[in-house]
Amino acid sequence: MAVYTQLSAETLSDLISHYDVGELVSAKGIAEGISNSNWLVETTTSRFILTMYERRIDIADLPFFLGLLDHLSAKGLPVPRTIHDTSGAASRMIDGKAVALIEFLPGVSIDNPTPSQAHNVGAVLARLHLAADDYPGRRTNDLGPDTSLHVLEQCGAEALARIDAELPEMLPMARSIAADWPKDLPRSVIHSDLFPDNVLMLGDEVSGLIDFYFACHDMTAYDLAVTHAAWSFDHDGRSFRSDIGSALIGGYQSVRALSVAERAAMPILARGACMRFISSRTQDWIDTPTDALVTRKDPMDFVRRLQFYQSNGAELFA
Amino acid sequence: MAVYTQLSAETLSDLISHYDVGELVSAKGIAEGISNSNWLVETTTSRFILTMYERRIDIADLPFFLGLLDHLSAKGLPVPRTIHDTSGAASRMIDGKAVALIEFLPGVSIDNPTPSQAHNVGAVLARLHLAADDYPGRRTNDLGPDTSLHVLEQCGAEALARIDAELPEMLPMARSIAADWPKDLPRSVIHSDLFPDNVLMLGDEVSGLIDFYFACHDMTAYDLAVTHAAWSFDHDGRSFRSDIGSALIGGYQSVRALSVAERAAMPILARGACMRFISSRTQDWIDTPTDALVTRKDPMDFVRRLQFYQSNGAELFA
């Protein structure tokens, strides 16, 4: 959520000259993206998002991510295209860091979705899963239930208890989720981080899906479970909005019906989705000094969601 | 240099509905401005900068700042107009904080200016001083040499020495600058912070002057001295670029000739300009924890500039 690197106007102009997009008119560092620097760049022909990959992202994965944008965009999904430079490359290097120029899409991220908006998000997620099915790139999910368990075990019960007295209860829960994790459900490329921040909307319509830097091959129903957990609760996870949850699943199934096995797996997939964010937020919580200016996200927000799914998942997804 | 406040799409849409600018299409928090939050906002009709005034800025001064933008813009200066809401107000309140919608101007900030660019910056600064002369608003400079001296005395020689062994030498220097500060030079509204960050350029042309939140009534030659100190050195103040300094003053005088008294005062005005930034940076340095993620600006960058002016000011401005 920050611009980590300063790029001079001279460096930006030089970069832009390697693309067939006209001349630089304006560039503003924008407070968007996790662990990347982003600029909203205007040229004499159009507007773009320039992303510099700072950390967390393995440069070897960039062709997977950038090719996926092009693949989905070519299939009519509201996904920004990668702009290729005049030599055809999807990314370039500046001072040892990879950068990519990406299409600018209109729209704003919604804080309090309506059922109609949630329906359309569900529908576009299903379209994404269908459109990505023949994408040739491959990337495994390195944030699955085994990783969540490992992260929490590395933190240890004592450190967890210092954050919240209820957090150590997640250790046996993470073990049981990892042990019972489904294996034979339909797979495709999934977004795996489709929070409202990563969806641009114009009115009720989805105008953009962005930030594919957690995309990977995994179970499509798991992606729906992540999206359900990300959209159907108030921020702190205390209150479930059943109208949003139902609209999201209804929208998804209006495009791609869930199989009986997928429906049956939804409760554990939803708990696993929560555990994935509990573990990463717990790690960030421990790694971030309390006086740092970065806002730490409270892992308990997703503990509450997990507890909700634990109590209500069976009937919710029946 | 950060977005301090999160504004939901719903809040932004509601805000935009109070202006005659169409409907919200996009809003990106931008990493710009000191102590303000800023968004680049796109509507169905145009683009704007939305500024939320977080701190440091006295809300009582807002009519002065926003009216000044309109005054200068109406006189043909490349200054962004304030967009007034449908009731005619230049600012509105959101959650107890003032916000203003401001025209978006193209251009990028230059790191390494050419003499031709510096000439045009000097010329536009002189045009600003002439155009602002009949602006009816009034605001005194609260960052003059007495303030610089007071700030450094409050820090104390010990704290200064902990930053740099040479910094305590600034105390007697600040006393002598405050004592000898000129009083009877021509005055107008001055920008007083015209660093390259606050100038947008398209090629050699100045396309925008921004961030007027230090503007005040003071000596116009002092504003030229601030701009000279801000533009004519490498970042750390170690090397003076005489071609840039000459071009800046030449550009200024191509529009408004300096009087004999102003030329004679330039060396002390330049030292006073440096002292103003030495004092504020010193205070920020002491107030900012070393492990904060905010980059502290080294006060020594301007100590070196001051030392340069001390040694060379007389012949430089002769």
Image: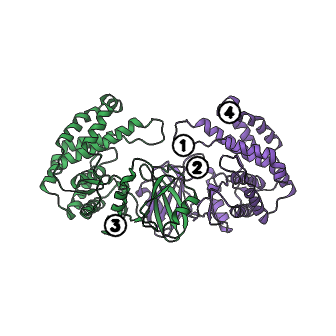
Chain colours: A green, B purple
Say which residue label 4 marks.
B160
Discs 3, 1 touching: Cβ within 8 Å: no
Say which residue label 1 marks.
B294
| Rendered residue at 17%/61% (across/down) | A257
Task: Tell me the quadrant of the picture where the C terminus of chain B can be found.
Answer: bottom right
Tag 3: residue type? Answer: Ser
Tag 1: residue type? Answer: Val
Position of residue B276 in the picture relative to residue A82 (left or right):
right
Q: Nearer the viewer, residue A72 or B239?
A: B239
Say which residue label 2 marks.
B34
Residue A73, numbered label = 3
Real-space Cα distance between discs 3 and 4?
Answer: 57 Å
Q: Do labels 1 and 2 share a chain?
A: yes
Chain letter behind tag 3: A
Q: How far from the left and from the top, in percent, is residue A110?
A: 37, 57
Q: How far from the left and from the top, in percent, is residue A11?
A: 56, 59
Q: Do labels 2 and 3 share a chain?
A: no
Tag 4: residue type? Answer: Leu
| Rendered residue at 44%/64% (across/down) | B24
